[in-house]
Image (spheres, rainbow, N blue to C red):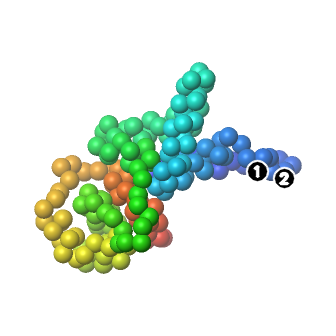
Amino acid sequence: MPKLCKPKRSHPHGLRPAVTHEKWHCELIRLAEEGEAYAGREILETIAESIDAGKLDVLLFRFLADKLWLYLQDGVPLERALGVEEFSQGGRKPHYSAIEILAVDTLLGQNGFSKERAIEWIEEYMGASRTTVQNIRRDLKFTRDFDKRALLALAGSHRAVVAGILLKNSD
């Protein structure tokens, strides 16, 4: 996903100012893109307050526009695109959907993973069996090509781990 926040230069006198709204918003965006639903909700609440106050917070509105395009153009479910989807944290095996597995499998394949290595990764990190992955590959196909940003969004609760492995793999 594109980085919406660029690092700022340090203060000219070496002093560090208190946390600004912009830094806080950058942190919220980072957390929302990692799947933290409370951060996505905080962003939406801040945007709603900005609208009520008649003010435009460019950084957060850019975030909102990016997420709305995921929904409108790429068909990512709205709660997932906005980063407010809740994922269970129970002690059972991780919950996943066929779409999440298909998105992760596609991302891994696009980034040099063999079919076998992708299955092993999905088994280890998502908890889906080899048979499940093979059945999904056989029975489901995306009807169009998605870019990396959309596939990461479709990966749901697994997006942060997948993004991390892709970054590590690109080095």
Identify the residue shown where x is 38% and y is 48%.
80
Q: Position of residue 134 (x, y in %)?
A: 18, 71
SS label for mark 2: loop
Identify the residue shown where x is 18% and y is 65%.
136
Which residue, given by chain and number where applicable, does mark 1 sit on?
A: 10
Identify the residue shown where x is 84% and y is 51%.
15
Tell which residue pokes out farthest to the right in this image: 13
Q: Which mark is residue 39?
A: none
Q: Is residue 141 visible?
A: yes
Identify the residue shown where x is 25% and y is 51%.
145
Q: Position of residue 132 (x, y in %)?
A: 20, 71
Tell which residue pokes out farthest to the top in this image: 54
Q: Mark 1 Cα within 10 Å, few/some/many (few <14, many 20+)?
A: few
Which residue, given by chain and number where applicable, does mark 2 sit on?
A: 14
Q: Position of residue 36 (x, y in %)?
A: 50, 54
SS label for mark 1: loop
Residue 156 sits above or below residue 121 on the image: above
The mark tally for this picture is: 2
Q: Amino acid at mark 2?
A: Gly
135 or 37: nearer the viewer:
37
Q: Is residue 63 left or right of residue 133?
A: right
Q: Quadrant of residue 67?
A: top left
Q: Is residue 85 left or right of residue 103?
A: right
Q: Mark 2 Cα within 10 Å, few/some/many (few <14, many 20+)?
A: few
144 or 70: nearer the viewer:
70
- Callout 1–callout 2 Cβ contact below 8 Å: yes
Residue 20 sits above or below residue 125 on the image: above
Q: Amino acid at mark 1?
A: Ser
88 or 22: nearer the viewer:
88
Residue 21 sits above or below residue 131 on the image: above
Q: Is residue 101 left or right of residue 33?
A: left
